[in-house]
Image (spheres, rainbow, N blue to C red):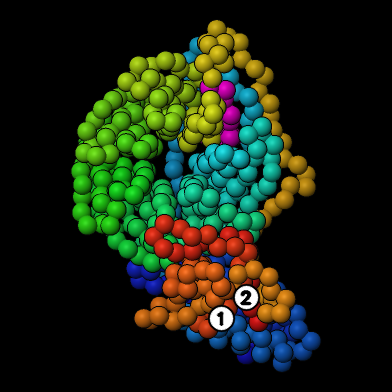
């Protein structure tokens, strides 16, 4: 073969929405691949002869055709819909500024934040995810193919939901695509609980995908623009323009619906309650059991984000006018301060510190201790430290190819891909593991009969294993 061959894989109701293009020019083979409608990534290889180049290209095309790709015409199929949240930010009307300890500017608008016990995570619209220590030291950078919608944690595992419909596992140095969301879903927010992915979308839809990256169930709530989804073992809590709707975790039905004062723009959860921030200047606390409204926390402008101290002892909110608030559990406002750098689009509290990502793309750490806040209200605040990235910062990208390793040289745990009831499953081959359990494994690299080696496996509730570390193919 010579010239260019263009293939697409787009499954109705499934997660795939990808293209694969191979170009042969003499002894050079160029491969371009990615999400339909995007520029994608490109690799180029050279071969000793034109004949060997054509043979290599034919093998690549054959592999894709066997996976379900088919010839297509570039540009005929539309890219997946993507809505990027449009937000405005006005100067704060607060008389004092919050005691900001340090600030890290990511370089683009940022919505994704997760604060773990050992580090902070922030993801921006450029597809950059940074990890920092609690002291502000920048530790590493992940470069993903598209903008980060949100960052969510599920025990040890950290996931980034991106505009291209892919959810990346960032728990290892090499991120990999753990879930792919059907192209007709315009993602707004995500949550993951015990390996089950929950997706809220532009149309007020809720889609649930299991740890095998397979569709489980979906519902359409009464209101569009669903910016909130939170999940626990009993239910999924879906916030949208008409309020919050709770569905049973197995999808068997609606448990309750509570109208909120205004459209929901952000959601948070504690063990017994969910918190909805709205465009009508309030955060409202709803009981998980029955949706009863237990408290309302009143701000001065539109609420973009909210969070709580453990158990809901304090409730924090960020508004569209660059202010941050703190309330008692019963709704009494304790303080309002300026953020010192834009409106907070997401936030999280940990160990008397409030972490926020703001409209200017900064991750901000605020000293939220009683003493620091009292000093700030009287006009005494620390000088905020502007954190800089190291010139040689480690940067990790999703692997374009799977590294191979000989069986004799492999170290780790061996798993195997097998065909079961028409579906590809992955089971553990190495001893000491339950062989009947499935392994959560990237669907796009599964090949029947192929064995892989992974660094570690961890059991998860529900009876499956999760991969930790690099995946390599055994040859």
**Looking at the image, residue 284 lies above or below residue 411:** above
Q: Relative to 178, is 365 on the left or the right?
A: right
Callout 2: SS: strand
Q: Which residue lies furthest to the front in this view?
A: 432
* Label 1 secondary element: loop
Q: Residues within 10 Å of mark 2 (few under 14, many from 20)?
A: many
Residue found farthest to the top: 378
At x 29%, y 53%, the residue is 249
First in sequence: mark 1 or mark 2? 1
115 lies above or below 452 = above
Dot 1 alpha-carbon crowd within 10 angstroms: few under 14, some 14 to 19, many 20 or more: some
What span is in magenta?
A: 358-368
Decide whether residue 149 is among the magenta residues: no
- Percent across and percent down for residue 305 are 43, 33
Residue at x 64%, y 78% (from the top left corner): 474
Residue 42 in view of the camera: no
**Residue 85 place in picture, x, y as percent:** 44, 43
CB contact under 8 Å: marks 1 and 2: yes
**Where does label 2 land, which residue?**
473
Please tell me whether the stretch drawn in magenta is mainly helix, strand or loop.
strand
| Quadrant (top left/top right/bottom left/bottom right) for the N terminus | bottom right
Any mark on residue 450, and which? 1
Q: Is residue 362 magenta?
A: yes
Q: Position of residue 197 (x, y in %)?
A: 40, 56
Residue at 63% from the left image edge and 53% from the top image edge: 143
């Amino acid at each position: 073969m010579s010239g260019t061959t263009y293939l697409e894989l787009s499954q109705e109701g499934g997660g795939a929405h990808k293209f694969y293009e191979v170009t042969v020019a003499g002894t050079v083979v160029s491969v371009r691949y990615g999400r339909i409608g995007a520029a994608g990534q490109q690799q180029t290889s050279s071969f000793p002869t034109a004949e060997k180049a054509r043979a290599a290209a034919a093998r690549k095309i054959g592999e894709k055709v066997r996976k379900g790709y088919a010839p297509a015409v570039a540009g005929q199929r539309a890219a997946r819909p993507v809505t990027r949240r449009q937000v405005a930010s006005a100067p704060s009307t607060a008389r004092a500024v919050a005691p900001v300890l340090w600030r890290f500017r990511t370089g683009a608008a940022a919505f994704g934040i997760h604060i773990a016990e050992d580090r902070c995570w922030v993801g921006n619209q450029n597809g950059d995810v940074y990890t920092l220590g609690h002291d502000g030291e920048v530790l590493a950078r992940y470069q993903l193919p598209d903008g980060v919608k949100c960052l969510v944690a599920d025990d040890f595992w950290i996931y980034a939901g991106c505009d291209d419909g892919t959810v990346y596992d960032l728990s290892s140095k090499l991120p990999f695509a753990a879930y792919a969301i059907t192209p007709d879903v315009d993602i707004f927010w995500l949550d993951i609980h015990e390996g089950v992915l929950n997706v809220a979308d532009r149309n007020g839809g809720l889609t649930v995908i299991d740890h095998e990256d397979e569709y489980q169930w979906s519902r359409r709530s009464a209101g569009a623009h669903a910016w909130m989804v939170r999940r626990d073992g009993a239910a999924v809590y879906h916030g949208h323009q008409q309020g919050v709707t709770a569905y049973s975790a197995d999808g068997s039905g609606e448990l309750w619906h509570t109208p909120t004062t205004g459209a929901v723009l952000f959601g948070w959860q504690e063990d017994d309650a969910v918190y909805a921030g709205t465009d009508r200047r309030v955060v409202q606390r709803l009981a998980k059991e029955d949706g009863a409204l237990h408290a309302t926390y009143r701000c001065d402008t539109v609420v973009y984000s909210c969070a709580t101290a453990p158990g809901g002892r304090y409730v924090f909110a960020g508004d569209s006018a660059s202010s941050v608030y703190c309330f008692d559990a019963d709704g009494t406002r304790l303080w309002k301060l300026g953020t010192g750098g834009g409106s907070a689009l997401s936030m999280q509290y940990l160990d008397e510190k409030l972490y926020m990502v703001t409209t200017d793309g900064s991750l901000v750490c605020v000293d939220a201790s009683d003493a620091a806040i009292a000093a700030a209200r009287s006009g005494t605040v620390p000088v905020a430290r502007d954190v800089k990235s190291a010139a040689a910062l480690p940067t990790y990208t999703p692997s374009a190819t799977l590294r191979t390793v000989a069986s004799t040289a492999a170290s780790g745990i061996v798993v195997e891909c097998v065909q079961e009831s028409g579906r590809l499953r992955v089971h553990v081959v190495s001893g000491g593991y339950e062989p009947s359990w499935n392994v959560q494994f990237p669907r796009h690299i599964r090949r029947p009969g192929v064995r892989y080696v992974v660094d570690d496996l961890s059991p998860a509730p529900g009876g499956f294993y999760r991969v930790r570390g690099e995946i390599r193919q055994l040859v």
